[in-house]
């Protein structure tokens, strides 16, 4: 299991310290939540702050767009060369076109599904994706409780992925802890996003290793 701590739960007064601490503690990716205050009822960070994160991170960035006008934001962050840029299927009218655009920029394209969105909504896009991110909380805020229905949803997506594109990874974001990590692994999940569980833990290395099962 790969672990991508969410910067949303970091101490923004000591952002460099916290980014360096999770990288030194052995995380696999640095998850960056970009919210525009329109698609979700929260406003987070723009390219100036994400550029600062990229400058001190020694692990690849995993940028999760929770925005309207996805193409504008892809262009905004493309120069930082993150490992992944993910966008919400619920917002994008032309997902295949945007997938091709992200890949043309040398970045791995990913699609995000909100808790209520069925995995079948990406069936005809799976062949062109590097990752699908399943939200296990309602997007917009950190520290929420895990929505259990993501487990069968991940298992269904895993079956589709294995049949259509075995190289496509499955990521889950929201309420991930050592209490549900084994269920996620057994459902076929490859990457977990963990914010408060990692950043609020007294020993970040221990927290990350408890998820890397």
Image: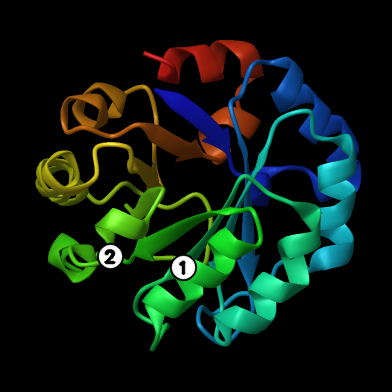
| Label 1 secondary element | helix
Name the spot of residue 90 as percent of width and height, x first: 34, 79
98 displayed left or right of 80: left
Query: In the image shown, does 39 or 144 lie closer to the viewer?
Result: 39
Query: Which residue is painted at 72% across and 74% down in the image?
Result: 75
Hey, which residue is sitting farthest front in the picture?
104
Name the spot of residue 135 as percent of width and height, x first: 35, 56
Q: Quarter holding the C terminus? A: top left
Q: Earlier in the sequence, mark 2 or mark 1?
A: 1
Question: Can residue 141 be seen in this snapshot?
Answer: yes
Name the spot of residue 209 as percent of width and height, x first: 50, 12
Q: Quarter holding the N terminus? A: top left
Location of residue 4 with respect to 45 vertically, above or below: above
Residue 67 lies in quadrant: bottom right
Name the spot of residue 151 as percent of width and height, x first: 17, 42
Query: Which residue is painted at 58% across and 29% down in the image?
Result: 198
Question: Can residue 43 be seen in this snapshot?
Answer: no
| Label 2 secondary element | loop
Count the numbered circles shown.
Answer: 2
Spatial CA span between label 2 and label 1: 9 Å
Q: Give me the disc on residue 125.
A: 2
Query: In the image shown, does 25 or 12 lie closer to the viewer?
Result: 25
Query: Which residue is painted at 37% across and 55% down in the image?
Result: 129
Q: Residues within 10 Å of mark 2 (few under 14, many from 20)?
A: some
Residue 202 lies in quadrant: top right
Query: Which residue is painted at 60% across and 44% down in the image?
Result: 6
Instruction: Give the colouring mode of the picture.
Output: rainbow
Q: Residues within 10 Å of mark 1 (few under 14, many from 20)?
A: many
- Pointer 1: what residue? 99
Location of residue 25 with respect to 161 vertically, above or below: above
Disc 2 and disc 1 in contact, CB within 8 angstroms: yes
């Amino acid at each position: 299991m790969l672990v991508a701590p969410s910067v949303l739960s970091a101490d923004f007064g000591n952002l460099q310290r916290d980014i360096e601490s999770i990288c030194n503690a052995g995380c696999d990716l640095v998850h960056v939540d970009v919210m525009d205050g329109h698609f979700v009822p929260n406003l987070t960070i723009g390219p100036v702050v994400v550029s600062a994160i990229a400058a001190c991170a020694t692990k690849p960035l995993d940028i999760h767009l929770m925005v309207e006008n996805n193409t504008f934001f892809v262009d905004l962050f493309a120069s930082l060369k993150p490992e992944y840029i993910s966008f919400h299927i619920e917002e994008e009218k032309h997902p295949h076109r945007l997938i091709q655009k992200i890949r043309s920029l040398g970045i791995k394209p990913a699609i995000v599904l909100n808790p209520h969105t069925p995995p079948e909504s990406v069936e005809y896009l799976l062949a062109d994706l590097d990752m699908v991110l399943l939200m296990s909380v309602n997007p917009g805020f950190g520290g929420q409780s895990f929505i259990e229905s993501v487990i069968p949803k991940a298992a269904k997506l895993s079956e589709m992925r294995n049949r259509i594109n075995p190289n496509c990874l499955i990521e889950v974001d929201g309420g991930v802890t050592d209490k549900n990590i084994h269920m996620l692994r057994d459902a076929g999940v490859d990457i977990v996003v963990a914010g408060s569980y990692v950043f609020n833990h007294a020993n970040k290395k221990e927290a990350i290793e408890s998820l890397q099962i």
